[in-house]
Amino acid sequence: MSENPEIHPRELLEKDYPYIDWSYSSYLVPKYPEMEVTMMKRMAEVAEKVVRDYSQEILLVGHGASVIGLTEGLTKETPTFKASLCCLVKLVKINDKWEIELGGDTSHLGETENQVRFV
């Protein structure tokens, strides 16, 4: 991303999204502009921190590129699945190694995108 994203005022967000946890603090905050390779490295670091801090099952929600980065960070391999919009990825830990059990699944969607873009 070449510039800081526009962020709505807190008052507007509180009205539209009353369940936002305002005490939450990100593991790592991006520094813009951020190249894709930097974002992928940041996502890998975030994945490691999340699994260190939480021992139960974890749901990671993100956009295509961040999902790829999180997956790569845990599996230590470049994922081969297509990370389209609203896809599901399930990682399981087997003998201290993360493996992809479900990669880029869109079977729950009525319509899917034809072209995956990381913009």
Image: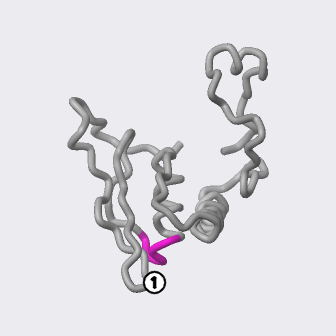
Residue at (36, 55) in percent of width and height: 89
Residue at (64, 62) in percent of width and height: 46
Q: Observer-nearest residue: 33 or 109?
A: 109
* Left or right placement of residue 6 versus residue 55 in this view: right
Name the dominant secondary structure of the magenta segment: loop
Amino acid residing under circle 1: Asp
Instruction: Measuring from the top left, give residue 112's x and y in whole percent.
Output: 27, 35
Residue at (66, 62) in percent of width and height: 42
Instruction: Measuring from the top left, give residue 5's x and y in whole percent.
Output: 71, 34
Q: Is residue 16 above or below residue 23?
A: above
Q: Farthest residue in the front direction?
A: 56
Structural crowding at the residue carrying mark 1, measured as other residues with C-alpha within 10 Å and reported as few (<14), some (14–19) or many (≥20): few
Q: Observer-nearest residue: 117 or 68?
A: 68
Membership of 102 in magenta stretch: no
- Residue receiving disc 1: 96
Instruction: Measuring from the top left, give residue 35's x and y in whole percent.
Output: 66, 56
Q: Quadrant of the N terminus?
A: top right
* Left or right placement of residue 32 versus residue 81 in this view: right
Q: Is residue 76 above or below residue 61?
A: below
Instruction: Measuring from the top left, give residue 6's x and y in whole percent.
Output: 73, 28
The region drawn magenta spans: 74-78
Quarter of image, res 55? bottom right
Q: Observer-nearest residue: 10 or 117?
A: 10
Q: In the rendered picture of this protein, how many numbered marks are placed on residues?
A: 1
- How are the colours assigned in the image? one colour
Residue at (49, 46) in percent of width and height: 61
Identify the element where label 1 is drawn.
loop
